[in-house]
Amino acid sequence: MLRLGLTGGIGSGKSTVATFFAGHGAVLIDADAISRESTAAGGQAMVPIAEAFGADFILPNGALDRAKMRKASFSDPAARSRLEAIIHPLVAESSAKLEQDALANKAPCIVFDIPLLVESRRWRARVDLVLVVDCIAQVQITRVMARSGLTREEVERIIESQAPRSQRLGAADIVIFNAGAPKEQIADEVGQIARRLGL
């Protein structure tokens, strides 16, 4: 079974590419989705987050106050490290379980959608190939502002906190450039790659 690591900066279009791979029979394991689930109301991360950061970081519905945590993480690297120490093991545990399920079902390929794949040696060691969805910063900023309501400054800070574009491209085995191409073109590129990979 092929393990394909999918990564790219925020707003690069990873989710679109991942969806197209799923259409070719790949099993998708989305680290961001697992993380969001763990910080939703009743999520596994919420008790340790409350203990580490206090009740001020919890919304009335019991979910993580993402805006407040984002602000704290950018102003205090230690806070970001504490949050990652809580969430990353939960993501790894859930990913491993989903991977075992895919193995049991004889899936031909698993696509691990990992935003921080390049920054994490542990994740890089778990995949056979790395596919980077590449994009220019201005397009990333425009996309993220449109979908999330974040300010330009907030999006720029997120981009700066991620691996540089050059570092991601240096780690890539396969690159899809997605800075305004029609979805049909991206779908066609994914289809060509999927066929080369035996899907």
Image (spheres, rainbow, N blue to C red):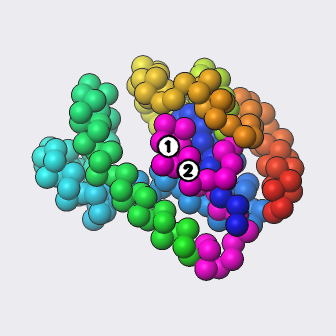
2 and 1 marks in contact (CB < 8 Å): yes
According to the picture, the residue beneath numbered tag 1 turns out to be 121
Residue 129 located within the stretch drawn in magenta: yes
Q: Nearer the viewer, residue 50 or 112?
A: 112
Label annotation for residue 91? none
Secondary structure of residue under mark 2? helix
Packing grade of label 2 (10 A; few <14, some 14-19, many >=20) is: few
Residue 132 located within the stretch drawn in magenta: no
Q: Which segment did they paint magenta?
A: 102-131
Callout 2 amino acid = Ala
> In the image, what residue occupies the spot 61% across and 32% down?
168
According to the picture, the residue beneath numbered tag 2 turns out to be 125
Q: Position of residue 61 (x, y in %)?
A: 24, 57
Position of residue 194 relative to residue 167, above or below, is below
Total label count?
Answer: 2
Packing grade of label 1 (10 A; few <14, some 14-19, many >=20) is: few
Q: Which quadrant is the C terminus positioned in?
A: bottom right
Q: Quadrant of residue 9?
A: top right
Q: Position of residue 68 (x, y in %)?
A: 26, 37
> In the image, what residue occupies the spot 65% across and 79% down?
105
Position of residue 177 relative to residue 33, above or below, is above
Q: Would residue 186 be visible to someone looking at this image?
A: yes
Q: Quadrant of residue 141?
A: top right
Q: Nearer the viewer, residue 21 or 55?
A: 21
Secondary structure of residue under mark 1? helix
Q: Would residue 72 be visible to someone looking at this image?
A: no
Q: Position of residue 147 (x, y in %)?
A: 53, 38
Callout 1 amino acid = Arg
Q: Is residue 126 left or right of residue 109?
A: left
Q: Nearer the viewer, residue 199 or 159?
A: 199
> In the image, what residue occupies the spot 17% across and 52% down?
50
